[in-house]
Amino acid sequence: MAVSKKNIRICANGHQYFKSSDCPTCPDCEQNRKPENGFLSLLVAPARRALENKNITTLEQLSKYSEATILQLHGMGPSTIPKLKAALKAKGLFFKK
């Protein structure tokens, strides 16, 4: 198995980090902007960014989408869906059919 070469990068906030991909996300900045509560706080960064990029920041907004549509978003994995379903259910909401 080939080992990916990691390159050092510096974000706009001056954090130094290593990345082996073209992903421009600084892990320090991403950790600092993670919500402390709410359903988005339950998600890993790629899934959270996927929803935020679609301007889905509330469960009410999320309930307007089907599970299949959410799964198609870049960064959304199948392990995230149970977390989203549980958060929706707790508010009496569900994915669109």
Image (spheres, rainbow, N blue to C red):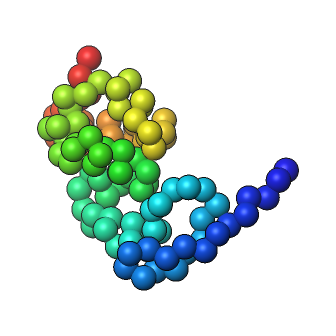
The residue shown at (25%, 28%) is: 65
Taking the image as shown, residue 26 lies to the left or right of residue 2, namely left
* In-front residue for pair 38/91: 38
The residue shown at (29%, 46%) is: 53
* In-front residue for pair 21/90: 21
The residue shown at (48%, 39%) is: 77
In the rendered image, the vertical position of residue 14 relative to residue 30, given as above or below: below
Counting from the top left corner in percent of width and height, residue 89 is at 24, 36
* In-front residue for pair 12/81: 12
**Residue 96: quadrant of the picture:** top left
Counting from the top left corner in percent of width and height, residue 42 is at 35, 54
**Residue 55: quadrant of the picture:** top left
Number of labels in the image equals 0
Please indicate, yes or no, whether residue 86 appears anywhere in the rendered image. Answer: no
Taking the image as shown, residue 77 lies to the left or right of residue 52, namely right
Residue furthest out toward the top = 97
Counting from the top left corner in percent of width and height, residue 94 is at 23, 29
In the rendered image, the vertical position of residue 15 relative to residue 66, given as above or below: below
Taking the image as shown, residue 77 lies to the left or right of residue 62, namely right
Residue furthest out toward the right = 1
The residue shown at (45%, 68%) is: 26
In the rendered image, the vertical position of residue 67 relative to residue 97, given as above or below: below
Please indicate, yes or no, whether residue 37 appears anywhere in the rendered image. Answer: yes
What is the quadrant of the C terminus in the image?
A: top left
